[in-house]
Image (cartoon, grey):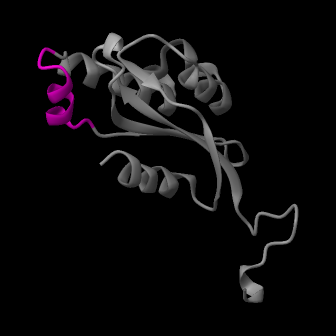
Amino acid sequence: MSERHIIKAGQGGGRDVFEYALLRVVPRVERGECVNAGVLVYCRAKAFVAARTHLDETRLLALDPNADVAGVRAALRGVEGVCTGGAAAGQAAHDDAGRRFRWLVAPRSTVVQPGPVHTGLTTDPAAEAERLLELLVK
């Protein structure tokens, strides 16, 4: 391995730790089937939290032809609003990015559910959110 690929212990090579979770749509909880519909990304070092979403209606309706597509889209917009902050975040508007992320990744029994939290290193959390959306959702 060349010297430029070696990262000394305890150093991230200028990268920051980030956390992410998938947003899954579970139209019929009793069946346990889901469709990935977005990602949540949080980077404490940059006070960054964001959601990127993409709902594949064809996949969703294949799992449940009676799925409430408009309701799922509204729930995904709500997650995006909490990440953005401001008036769209409701009560979470005054919380810091970390609290908003932790609230969004808390387990829940709704149609839109967060998956497990994973970690990584990045220099650009916004670009990481786009990359994860392309890799895991689209």
For residue 81, what is the image quadrant? top left
Picture coordinates of residue 113, whole percent (x, y) = 44, 22
Q: Nearer the viewer, residue 101 or 22?
A: 22
* Circle count: 0
Q: Is residue 45 above or below residue 7?
A: above
Picture coordinates of residue 131, whole percent (x, y) = 44, 57
Say whether residue 60 is magenta.
Answer: yes
For residue 101, what is the image quadrant? top right
Picture coordinates of residue 89, whole percent (x, y) = 48, 21
Q: Nearer the viewer, residue 93 or 65?
A: 65
Q: Quadrant of the N terminus?
A: bottom right
Q: Is residue 114 above or below residue 90?
A: below
Q: Work out which residue is located at the far right of the displayed protein and give it.
A: 9
Q: Which residues are magenta?
A: 55-66
Picture coordinates of residue 121, whole percent (x, y) = 66, 57
Residue name at image x 32 percent, y 25 percent: 33
Residue name at image x 64 percent, y 22 percent: 95
Q: Work out which residue is located at the far front of the displayed protein and give it.
A: 31
Residue name at image x 87 percent, y 61 percent: 10
Residue name at image x 29 percent, y 49 percent: 138
Q: Is residue 76 left or right of residue 40?
A: left
Q: Is residue 101 left or right of residue 61?
A: right
Say whether residue 122 is magenta.
Answer: no
For residue 15, what is the image quadrant? bottom right
Q: Is residue 28 left or right of residue 52?
A: left
